[in-house]
Amino acid sequence: MSDCTSRIFSIGTCSTADASCANAVSWPWPWLLAAGNCCVLKPAEDSPVTAVELARLAAEAGFADGAFNVVTGVGVEAGAALAAHPGIDHLSFTGSRPVGTAVATAAAANVVPVVLELGGKSPNIVFADADLDRAVPLIVNSIVQNAGQTCTAGSRVLVHQSVHDEVVARVRERFEAVRTGPGPDDPDLGPLTNATQRDRVAAMVGRARADAELVTGGEAPGGAGFFFPPTLFDHVPVGSEIGQQEVFGPVLAVTTFRTDDEAVELANATEYGLVAALWTGSVGRAHRLAAELDAGQVFVNTYGAGGGIELPLGGTKRSGYGREKGVEGLLGYTRTKAVVVGLA
């Protein structure tokens, strides 16, 4: 391995298509390499192509041998072995909470730091004074992009009761106009990553019919491919499965609120805390409520789904801890050393 400060293992086992996996694998390694470390990247077994291509490009660009490494394989074998390896000095994981817990346990056994990004149930909060012409397209995109297979997907809409009907009607219209197809066709919505994930989404949608009103979507189309249509549920109880758990598919849950305090209470009423968005014409409300939302990123009148490379990304509560990207991400891959010199 090349001469480096530390060896950092970045592992992603989220069930994503390569397009969304590209985000997970690209967040840690530029920062850790910039801090003088070497990287060992283990991509999800369902989506290794992006990581392997990154390794090829790194070699082509002239990276030192051993600076950027990719190990493919099944998570319970290759991932577990790497996470427990005593030669790893830092672990960064993006994926499910159960696997994240196992990664954190492996890190604790070797007394090394870990960054965990374990998903979200992120809300778009739409107030009565929101610019709906701006809000609705971004709300739809936040759940349709990558077929909803992103940890930062905007999978909930909390909407003021006075604009509820209009928001639901507009979202439904856009959902029903979404073009679905294979990636090379450049559609609005591509497939889910595999049959297991498609069946999981379908099962959650089926159970949600007992708790909420299905507005559109809800049935996987026949034929080849693991497609699932944009699916909209209205009047979703906050405590229901579809209101609490990450679907990891193009499924949007709508709940109404009456007051600012109720909006914040609903937004914070899940075990996740990754991203939230406020849609309002009031700057004062935006600043006040942004401070009250329990989320690692808060957008106002936009939705960045993780934001740019300069914005730190990470969660609160069961969404994980630590930060990727931004200055905070860079500092996370460094060690502070105090050197004190006594002068005569």
Image (cartoon, rainbow, N blue to C red):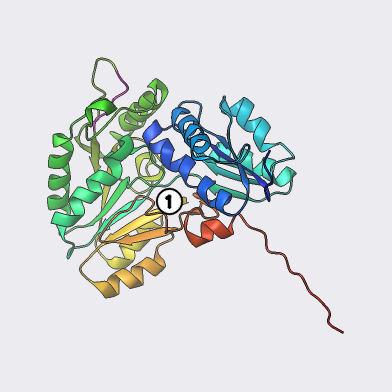
Of residues 42 and 223, the one nearer the viewer is 42
Image quadrant of residue 65? top right
In percent of the image, x 23 and y 26: which residue is there? Answer: 181
Asked if the stretch drawn in magenta spans residue 228, the answer is yes
Please provide the residue range marked out in magenta: 225-229
In percent of the image, x 26 and y 23: which residue is there? Answer: 220
Residue at which label 1 appears: 270
Q: Mark 1 is on which residue type?
A: Thr
In percent of the image, x 23 and y 71: which residue is there? Answer: 282
Q: Is residue 300 left or right of residue 244?
A: left
In the picture as drawn, the residue positioned furthest to the right comes out as 344
In the picture as drawn, the residue positioned furthest to the top comes out as 223
Is residue 57 placed above or below 335 in the rendered structure?
above
Q: Circle 1: is it few (<14), some (14-19), or many (20+) Cα within 10 Å?
A: some
Image quadrant of residue 99? top right
Q: Position of residue 35 (x, y in %)?
A: 59, 54
Q: Secondary structure at mark 1?
A: loop
Image quadrant of residue 219? top left
